[in-house]
Amino acid sequence: MEILEISGYTEFEKLNIATRYLVPRQRENAGLKDIDIEISENAIRQIIHYYTMESGVRNLEREIGSVCRKIARQVLKDGEESKEKSYHVEAKDIAQYLGVPKYRPDKANEKDHVGLTNGLAVNAFGGSILECEVAVVPGKGKLNITGLLEKGMQESAQAAMSYIRSRQKVLGLEKDFHSKYDVHIHFPSFVPKDGPSAGITMATSVASALLKIPVRKNVAMTGEITLRGRIMPIGGLKEKLLAAHRAEIEVVLVPKENQKDLKEIPRRVLNALRIVLVEHMDEVLREALVLSDPDALFGEHQTRPAEYRDGELITPEAPDAEDVPEPTVDPPGARQ
């Protein structure tokens, strides 16, 4: 037997399925076929975001059916007047039909915070925002990692910390910072987490906490990190970008090797996001940290990463050889 993995429906697919099939079917089931009823697209989005959490549309149809049945009760109360009356359901009316929202959708932070970074994750219900926060306290160099993390993420956190230590001079950290402070990495949501794709998220939070520089609130990221700061490709990019779009994130940092996966992303999502294709952790910190002068930290001659902006690929030109400063030391094998 061959196993076929089918990804869940996107928000746009759920909306189209509900508009074309679920709403008409539930109207007929509730005996409202001849009644003037309109459930707006925003109302359906409200149900998708606040009252369902699933990869399919089964619960969505149940909630729509509940709305239709309550409208049917109102039609019976109105009697003969219902034949000349229109029933319009908007997003603000959903709470009256379905009660208190069952779920809280992901949202970007309201302001920039030190040590708090927006990561991206994939679960059985699709993509989601995965917050990573880091606290640095006086200690003896202990690294604490909490938040129901599996072994893969714990090892990724250790790799992120090793990268920060290897860039101690570039980042302007104290020479012995790793032995003077304890670093605590925490993922607040209390669900099991696994996979290495949060590597650059953890490295960004650690760097932010050590440098005391906030992370931009409108930036989210995903990518595996190596000890040398290289960024490796990840899976589930489509679901992650859709989650960033729902959370009103503006900039998403993804591994350059995942560029081929962008062809699966809906055009409206590509147009709404600025997607930066990063290869090294230095590029991530340049984009993510609130730096008044990034060139002062990483050098002005560093080649900028390619990016998708308004759905179009933008590839910056490499710096001219004349603009690159001469090396301060002789290359290996040079004659004295």
Image (cartoon, helix red, strand yellow):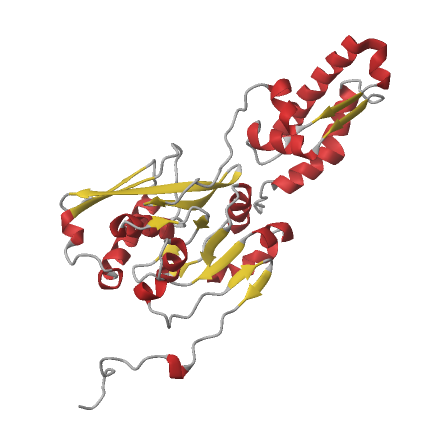
Q: Where the N terminus falls, by quadrant?
A: top right
Q: Position of residue 162 (x, y in %)?
A: 25, 56
Q: Residue at x 67, y 27 (%)?
A: 61
Q: Where the C terminus falls, by quadrant?
A: bottom left
Q: Residue at x 36, y 70 (%)?
A: 300
In the picture, measured across the screen, residue 177 lies left or right of residue 300, that is left
Residue 272's place in the image compared with 93, above or below, is: below
Q: Residue at x 58, y 18 (%)?
A: 99
- Taking the view exactly as shown, the residue that stands out farthest to the bottom is 335
Question: Image quarter for residue 5?
Answer: top right
Q: Position of residue 88 (x, y in %)?
A: 74, 25
Q: Residue at x 16, y 43 (%)?
A: 138
Q: Position of residue 41 (x, y in %)?
A: 69, 34
- Taking the view exactly as shown, the residue that stands out farthest to the front is 292
Picture mark count: 0
Question: Image quarter for residue 171?
Answer: bottom left
Q: Position of residue 265 (x, y in %)?
A: 59, 52
Q: Nearer the viewer, residue 200 or 153?
A: 200
Residue 293's place in the image compared with 194, above or below, is: below
Q: Can the viewer see residue 141?
A: no
Q: Nearer the viewer, residue 193 or 92?
A: 92
Q: Nearer the viewer, residue 178 or 272?
A: 272
Q: Can the viewer see residue 287?
A: yes
